[in-house]
Amino acid sequence: MTKQTPSHTTTRRRAALLALITSLGAGLLTACQNPASNSTAIRIGYSAWPGWFPWAVTEAKGLFTGVASQAKMQWFDGYLDSINALNAGQLDCNSQTLNDTISSIAGGADLQVVLQNDYSTGNDQIVVADGINAVADLKGKKVAAEEGTVDHYLLLKVLKDGGLKPSDITFVPLETGAAAAAFAAGQVDAAGVYAPFTTQALKRTGSKALTTSREHPGAISDLLVCRREFVEKNPEAIQEVVNAWFATLKLMKDDPATTLPILVQRSGVSEQEFKEYDAGTTIQSLSENQTNFKPGNTMTSLPYAAEQISNFLVEVGLATKKPDLSTLLNSTFVDNAK
């Protein structure tokens, strides 16, 4: 509402008061007649990952409806910045991994997973310089990754599986884009990066992926995570957001001609490069979501994966104690999705 210049006459004051009452009355009447006015301006963060680029389609195609019709997607150039924004209450929900969500909960955040977008099947990589052919060859080498986030987790897992300790390498903490650039420039010997930053890293002559998330199925799960307080106060809005995600996946399947350009533009790479990411990110359907929220004995089961990741984070020192995961997974919205 435009701020008006204060009036100095009784007549004008009465007129202004009458106008205000009329305006408020009309507004209340409109609110009663128009359900969209009761919408929730939910703030959702996302960043550069193939499994989250569909959110750009959701927004561009106006697929947020009902009480979530005013939902706003907020893009972050730095993935860690989006996590910090959620933890600080500057977002209501964020696109982030299970690993990083558990790390946040271990640090005191109260978060809930309401949707699984995908899990990584190759787009998270440990990229190495020419001459490094096995995990053992990383001993004594400079290795960059974004400290405390998903590819740092992958790096530590790869080292452990290969018989090395974190102290066996010189760890260089860099934001993922900077890690890819440092590797491409020959400043480090290896880097833990994810698509689309893998494209930049692999431009270094002789470089290759030593190992990828394909060899660790289910270990890196990508999710929509919300502040639990917000979920409890706004279940209808969360349901509409989850519904919008699956409507987006359907539209992408039915109308690739208009949705693919949106995905490519958001990714910042060529269409051919973007298509190469397909196999490295396994988008999870509604039925797969409903299954994955249930207990199981493999890493594709979110309860099982959460327990395993929680133990690992404590073991390698990324968390000081095992967090309480009793309220982490909320399957309500995928169970009721349509």
Image (tube, grey):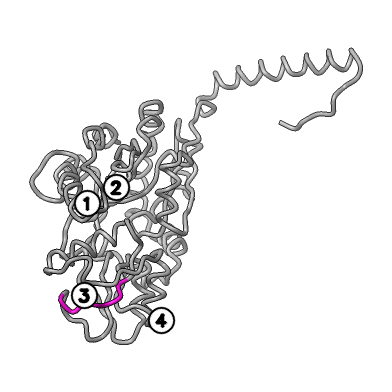
Tell me the crowding category of disc 3: few under 14, some 14 to 19, or many 20 or more residues within 10 angstroms, Cα based: some
* Residue 294 x, y percent position in the rendering: 15, 38
Q: Give the labeled residue for mark 2.
A: 103
Magenta stretch, residue numbers: 136-143
Disc 2 to disc 1, C-alpha distance: 8 Å
Q: Give the labeled residue for mark 3.
A: 210
Contact between marks 2 and 1 (CB within 8 A): the answer is: yes
Q: Secondary structure at mark 4?
A: loop
Disc 1 to disc 3, C-alpha distance: 22 Å
Label whose residue precedes the other's in the sequence (1 or 4): 4
Contact between marks 1 and 4 (CB within 8 A): the answer is: no
Label whose residue precedes the other's in the sequence (4 or 2): 2
Residue type highlighted by circle 3: Leu
* Residue 86 x, y percent position in the rendering: 42, 43
Disc 4 to disc 3, C-alpha distance: 18 Å
* Residue 91 x, y percent position in the rendering: 46, 41
**Measuring 45% from the left and 61% from the top, which residue is drawn there?**
266
Q: Give the labeled residue for mark 1.
A: 313
Q: Secondary structure at mark 2?
A: helix
Residue type highlighted by circle 1: Leu
Label whose residue precedes the other's in the sequence (2 or 1): 2
Viewer-nearest residue: 249 or 161: 161
